[in-house]
Image (cartoon, rainbow, N blue to C red):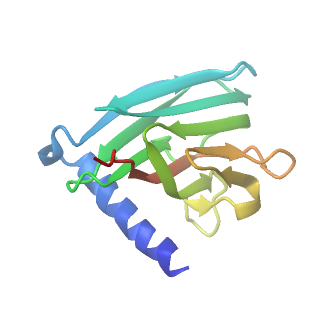
Amino acid sequence: MAWAGHALGLAVILICAVGSSGAAGLSRTGKFDVRPGGLVHSHSETLGEHVCTFTYASQGGTNEQWHMSVGISEDNKLFSCSVWRPQGKSYLFFTQFKAEVTNAKIEFANGFSQAAVEGRNDVPLKENEYIIGENTVTQKDGSFRSELSKLLIIARIRHDEL
C-alpha cells in the first residue's frame, strides 16, 4: 500500500504539471463528447510517442463534455493519462470502458464513481470493478456498477536499452 500512496503523490504532481502552462511540451488536454446510445466510441490524445485511448459505450441522458489529459514527467520516466468530466458527476451509465496506453507499462490506475458520498465527488471505484493490465484498464464484467466520472493512469515509460 505504500506504493499506492507514492503513486498517488506522483499522480498529483503529474496532474498539476498537466494543468500548468509552464509544462509546455510535457502535457496536453483535449475535450471530447461522451455520447450515449450504446455504441462504442473512442477518444485518443498523443504526446510524443505515447498515446492514451479511452474506448467506451454508455446509455442514458445526452452528450456530456469530458476531458483527457496526458503528460510526461520532467525526467521522462512516467506517462500519465486522466479522463474526467469537469462537472464531476456524470449522468450516463457506462456499459463498458477501456483505457489503453502505448509505449508504457501501467504502474497505478484508479477509477472514480460519480456516486457522491458525504459531499465528496471523487469516490474510488471498488478494486473488483475494474482490471488493470500491463497497458490497459477495463471494467470487470459483472462487477462494474456502470458509474464512472474519472479515470487516472500512471505508467512507466519503456526505454529501449542500447
In this view, 67 is above or below 153: above
Residue at image x 55%, y 44%? Answer: 135
In this view, 43 is above or below 24: above
> Which is more toward the observer, 157 or 62?
157
Residue farthest bottom in this picture: 2
Q: Can you give x and y, in whole percent of width and height, for residue 79 in the image?
A: 37, 48
> Which is more toward the observer, 35 or 156?
156
Q: Can you give x and y, in whole percent of width and height, for residue 56 in the image?
A: 65, 30
Total residue callouts? 0
In this view, 128 is above or below 66: below
In this view, 23 is above or below 118: above
Instruction: Confirm whether residue 69 shows in the render.
Output: yes
- 81 sits to left or right of 136: left
Instruction: Confirm whether residue 35 shows in the render.
Output: no
- 70 sits to left or right of 108: left
Residue farthest left in this picture: 22
- Residue 54 picture quarter: top right
Image quadrant occupied by the N terminus: bottom right
- 76 sits to left or right of 1: left
Q: Can you give x and y, in whole percent of width and height, for residue 117 in the image?
A: 65, 66
- 90 sits to left or right of 47: right
Residue farthest right in this picture: 142
Residue at image x 18%, y 37%? Answer: 25
- Residue 39 picture quarter: top right
Residue at image x 28%, y 32%? Answer: 48
Q: Can you give x and y, in whole percent of width and height, for residue 27 in the image?
A: 26, 41
